Image (cartoon, rainbow, N blue to C red):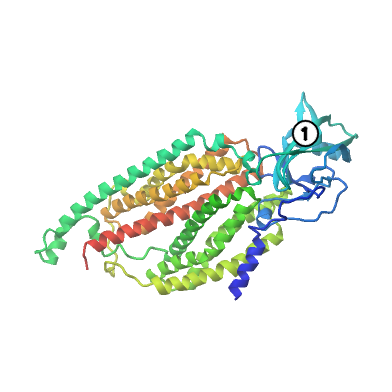
Amino acid sequence: MYLLRTFVAVIALLGAFADEHDHLYEDKDEVVLWMNTVGPYHNRQETYAYFSLPFCAGNKNAINHYHETMSEALQGVELEISGIDIEFKVDVHKAIYCGVQLDAEKYKAFVYAVKNHYWYQMYIDDLPIWGIVGEVTDSNYYIWTHKKFEIGYNGKQIVDVNITSEDKVLLTPNTKLSFTYEVIWKKNNIKFEDRFDKYLDPSFFQHRIHWFSIFNSFMMVIFLVGLVSMILMRTLRKDYARYSKDDDVDDMERDLGDEYGWKQVHGDVFRPASHSLLFSALIGSGHQLTTVVFSVITFAILGELYTERGSLLSTSIFVYAVTSPVNGYFGGSLYARMGGKLWIRQMLVSAFLMPALVCGTAFLINFIAIYYHASRAIPFGTMVAVTCICLFVILPLTLVGTVLGRNLAGQPDHPCRVNAVPRPIPEKKWFMEPGVIIMLGGVLPFASIFIEMYFIFTSFWAYKIYYVYGFMLLVYIILLIVVVCVTIVCAYFLLNAEDYRWQWTSFLCAASTALYVYFYAVYYFFFKTKMYGLFQTAFYFGYMALFSAGMAVMCGTVGYAGTSLFVRKIYSTVKID
């Protein structure tokens, strides 16, 4: 019952699938114009409250409903009442709703905003609309003072909103600005469920190069799977034949005759990985992240999460919380099979590894956001809510998964006996060293996804709404297959060189994909964007590092899992005691 009450509280807290109203209006019902944020056009994440600029609000200061979720607070959404009176199907001719006396301070604020190309965002019935503060003409600074709203309706629902900025006024100190608005209602045939289509950009996301990249990655998968199957099966067949051809020779002679190859390390290949506590925590977290990514992409395909503010983030937090038993199960069972005794410590590290990484990064960036008075600063109440989710949802569920994992799959079942004394690792050529293998292992997986990375980066760091989650799911599956194939080949080469340190090597070999993603993120920042300033730079590189770290854990886990199955298969086929 405690867990049930906790889940109910979390769902209510997240509000992932709740809305402020049902989007149905009767004639003359109030329609709220929410003012959200304002900020530089080229720095999308550097946003400030709309009224941080000396804009003025209308006389209306009370509404019948309000809507804000935890995910909106995390994303810097700051909805404030505009004070502009709008009623359903009621046209409003040009009218003054407020005025501002431009003293020296307010004049400088508007000039700074115009000079830095400030845009603002508003919402009407959850539909976003954008406007520009002003423009520079011949070294003069002008501000738009008239907002013309054209709102389309279909029956009792709002299906389209457009804004036109008019009445360009020269900014002059010690003058008064009068802000006006106009509302025009138009009947529209757009269906309510299709009203977000105007915000999508099919010509960009469904460009020919996007389809070509998917086809190219798919061909790479076929090639790699075929190559891995051909090389490994032919090589292993020869190895099996060589290792089993002299069945009539006694064990000592057969052992003396095998002086090379992967069979030589059969007594050490299942030796526990170094730093097994950290390793098992990473593997548990990676299984959970893999499940979360697949689930969220599936929900996004089925539910069109991009149509609701903050719904994608809310869904991600909710899915991550409820999949915590996956983390505990795989991490706890692996740690038990490796002979670990500090299972409570391992469970705590596994439960808080990713949350601590996320919260630590957000906490550091939050200091900069607070210094800039940006809307991206996370409120204290939201921090408390996230902490409660970690302590009262993620931790107990991870504990449940750990106990199940240790009891159901925690017994060692290696096909080969582990020697008491580790075998010395012979010298090998430089390109067979684990460090070189790790760096080369991420090249092909990155090559299979880097085009999709461009579309994802553009949607997050520019004014695009990502909606082609079918593409993302396909690329995600391709990435996992390529990672497994590449990691198996690298591990086989390492074992053939009589180096049994395959656990960490297979993990880091796949995880190095994220290193190349981060390198691409650096390139994208300098050559594909016009971002500037300390806040935007820290925000970009901080969260891209977090994104890359999550990808490293996920890819590393998938690579290790595939390699583990392969290693168990080859050593169980060759019967060795």
Asked if residue 357 is positioned above or below residue 60 in the image, the reply reads below
Asked if residue 292 is positioned above or below residue 404 in the image, the reply reads above
- Lateral position of residue 241 relative to residue 444, left or right: left
Decide which of 187, 561 is in the foreground and name it: 187
Amino acid carrying mark 1 in the image:
Ser
Q: Residues within 10 Å of mark 1 (few under 14, many from 20)?
A: some
Q: Residue at x 48, y 48 (%)?
A: 473
Question: Where residue 188 sits: x, y (%)?
Answer: 70, 39
- Lateral position of residue 210 relative to residue 303, left or right: left
Q: Is residue 342 visible?
A: no
Q: Is residue 138 visible?
A: yes
- Residue with the mark numbered 1: 165
Which residue occupies the extreme left position in the image?
248
Question: Where residue 81 sits: x, y (%)?
Answer: 80, 49
Q: Residue at x 16, y 55 (%)?
A: 241
Image quadrant where residue 245 sits? bottom left
Where is the N terminus found, in terms of image quarters? bottom right
Image quadrant where residue 142 sits? top right
Where is the C terminus found, in terms of image quarters? bottom left
